[in-house]
Image (cartoon, grey):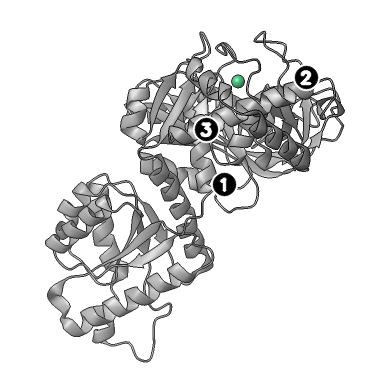
Amino acid sequence: MKEFKQLEAWFITGSQHLYGEETLKKVAGHSKIISKAFNDAATIPVKVVFKPTVKSPEEIYAICQEANSSANCIGVITWMHTFSPAKMWINGLKILQKPLCHLHTQFNRDIPWSDIDMDFMNLNQSAHGDREFGFIMTRMHKRRKVIVGHWQSESVQQQINTWSRAAAAWHDWQGARFVRFGDNMRFVAVTDGDKVEAEMKFGYSVNTHGVGDLVNMINKVTEKQIDNLCIQYNEEYKLAASLKNGEENYASLREAAKIELGLRKFLKEGNFKGFTDTFEDLHGMTQLPGIAAQRLMADGYGFAAEGDWKTAALVRAMKVMATGLKGGNSFMEDYTYHFDPKNEMVLGSHMLEICPSIAKNKPSCEIHPLGIGGKADPVRLVFNVNGGEALNASIIDMGNRFRLLVSEVKAVAPEKDLPKLPVARVLWKPYPDMSTGCAAWILAGGAHHTCFSQNLTPEHLEDFADMAGIEVVFIDKETKLRDFKNQLRWNELSMR
Ligand code: MN
């Protein structure tokens, strides 16, 4: 994934003319120091840009308008160093379309006990100035993140990090294009949904291309390109003996490489950020894309199978959020269960398409029959995944709204070999326990397709859901089924 350094979060400080030039100079000076500290902080991945203090409705409106039209501005961080009467903010906030982070901090960490006087009191008013600002946003139903604490604290900078990652992913979705080859898997409900509503809500478009358009592109791939990619496969993975040059399945490896090259070109030329395919519609293709989908995901493309465009878009967003972090994010499916009462867990996998960004070791590149779809045996990468804290996320279409579900899990390394399982796989234990975690997911209508993440936290997705203005529910160590059912009922009313 590309780095975030071209992306900007604007640091906007609110005040008013009441205090005179001297105080306003100090306000601007302090804002500069804080925004520079954020900009230089290793924990904050985006550029933090200082903006001149806003003191009137006109200045506030103008900066909001400027933020909306700036191509690199992913959101604004606001802070009221002094009191900034909030009716001045109404028209600006009304038009602001970028995510907003309200930083409730103050310049000094401690009260200067022996020096504090009325000049100090006139300057350092955020404890009440930010409350006035908070009121107007609540009154206007403005979704935002509120971060409280001294600006130099690790916790504040970490929360800005999280918010800016969510904002970068939100920025990436605006105007993004996702392509589906073929339609939804026949008769499947949860992967279907309202693409018009999704574009209105999320900013990305989903359009279908007949698989023939892709096949045309695949057929233009040259033998030389295929040679080179097969060499690359051999270098990057443990290639199964039968797939080596000159062996019985080498032609299948070449076919897989050809599919990858064609897909890659199609996505690049169409400026797509992700795609879906379906095993039910592969006319003119010999294999279902396996290694191709896996490697494209590893390069940052969103992907989900069976026409599941909502999950493909979510995989893309989560990959953007996680840019530069250790660990990976992958398309995932709850596949099968281990119901040993002492060691209950889920085996997650898919027919083929798990992203090698979550692999524990160098993947092996193998070929096996698929069993469905009636196509030739597809080439795929097979690997295990490390244990550790992780989560699954899913967006579903409730008919009148979208719901994001986030389920925290503990991934566990497999205790036994799975020598006959020909796909990449992950094992995890849902929180708070298997039966509560799975029951909550099913009660909330969560899909069988998810994005599995090793490096994002529920807070990333909470911030992201707030930017999108959608419902989000969490399943975690604290989840109690009765409360959870009530939460779903109450959300049903409030989100109607
Ligand atoms: Mn599936």
Disc 1 marks which amino acid?
Answer: Leu
With respect to residue 43, does 236 lie above or below?
A: above
- Across and down, in percent, residue 243 comes to 81, 27
- Across and down, in percent, residue 26 comes to 27, 81
Q: Quadrant of the C terminus?
A: top left
Q: In screen coordinates, is 203 left or right of 340?
A: left
* Residue under the point 49% across and 14% down: 189
- Give the residue number, with chain letter if any, for mark 3: 265
- Give the residue number, with chain letter if any, for mark 2: 368
Disc 3 marks which amino acid?
Answer: Lys
Q: In screen coordinates, is 292 left or right of 340?
A: left
Which of pointers 3 and 1 indicates the residue nearer the eye? 3
Q: In screen coordinates, is 121 left or right of 385?
A: left
**Quadrant in the rendering for residue 176:** top left
- Across and down, in percent, residue 290 comes to 66, 25
Disc 2 marks which amino acid?
Answer: His
Report crowding for label 3: few under 14, some 14 to 19, many 20 or more residues within 10 A (C-alpha): some
Element class at badge 2: loop
Q: For the residues marked 1 and 2, what is the alpha-carbon distance in whole angstroms?
A: 33 Å
Which one is nearer the viewer's eye here, 100 or 2?
A: 2
Q: In screen coordinates, is 284 left or right of 340?
A: left
Which one is nearer the viewer's eye here, 219 or 150?
A: 219
**Quadrant in the rendering for residue 489:** top left
Q: Is residue 175 visible?
A: yes
Q: Within 8 Å: ligand 1 and the Cβ of disc 1?
A: no
* Residue under the point 74% across and 38% down: 231
Element class at badge 3: helix
**Quadrant in the rendering for residue 70:** bottom left
Q: Is residue 485 visible?
A: no
Q: Looking at the rendered structure, which numbered label has been put on residue 456?
A: 1
